[in-house]
Image (cartoon, grey):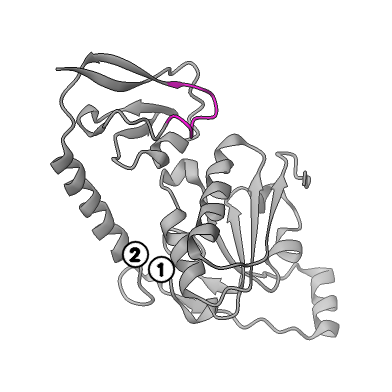
Amino acid sequence: MIRKIIHIDEEKCNGCGLCASACHEGAIDIIDGKAKLVRENFCDGFGDCLPACPTGAISFEEREAPAYDEAAVKESKEKKAEKKMKGFHIAGGCPSSKAASFHREEDASQEQSIESVHPVSRLNQWPCQIKLIPTQAPFFDGAKLLIAADCTAYAYANMHEEFMKGKITIIGCPKLDAVDYTDKLTAIIRDNDIKSVTIVRMEVPCCGGLQRAAENALRASGKFIPWQVVTISRDGKILD
């Protein structure tokens, strides 16, 4: 049948993955660093992915395409939701996702002498990946939350002392994970006593997906919490 469907210009696509996150039907995948419409029967033609594209690589066209399959989309969403829920646990399952808190000593005199020789880790809990962390855990109670892009810890040399110290740190990469973190971040902020939120991202466009998800989560939580965004340059400087 002839119907309206999206078209992705691969020459303009930078592979940021924001369109894949914005597509609620799951019609788009990132393959070999480019967005591709891989499930034409999942594309409803409404274009939720268009505003998310920073390079203007997505447009509408009318052409021969399979009909939109609402039942298949629903089944796919249910399977993804079931898979996601399996990761929302505090103990059991994969050992790498078992939640734990780390009690860091705050003796200033000892700390100064130790740090002069060896840097001290400021990670206060495990796991730290957004995809693995439970939406509710004791370490969230009264926490200052740091939501950081994966690359920031490698680009910014003093990440532990300036940003992670005294906070619960959760990290992710919207491009590599190819998911929208909004729902999970909303649950974390809404269902726990979070005192503040700091978002640390890289200057690259794909990191906008992390910032956007955190901002949407703050709004959706219905809470008024102090928050800030810090952007790190690729050469390790704070831009704002």
x then y, percent, for residue 224:
61, 67
Q: Which residues are magenta?
A: 50-58
In front of the other: 173 or 55: 55
Lateral position of residue 90 relative to residue 121, left or right: left
Residue sitting at x 41%, y 43%: 178
Q: Please give the count of numbered marks on the rendered protein.
A: 2
Question: Which residue does the numbered mark 1 point to in the structure image?
Answer: 97
From the viewer's side, name the closer residue of 188 and 148.
Answer: 188
Q: Quadrant of the N terminus?
A: top left
Instruction: Give the residue type that dot 1 points to.
Output: Ser
* Label located before the other in sequence (1 or 2): 2
Rendered image: mark on residue 87: 2
- Identify the main secondary structure in magenta: loop
- Horizontal side of 15 relative to 198 (left or right) equals left
* Amino acid type, mark 2: Gly
Is the Cβ of the residue at disc 1 closer than 8 Å to that at disc 2? Answer: yes
- Residue at horizontal 35 percent and vertical 68 percent from the top: 88
What is the x, y in percent for residue 135? 43, 69
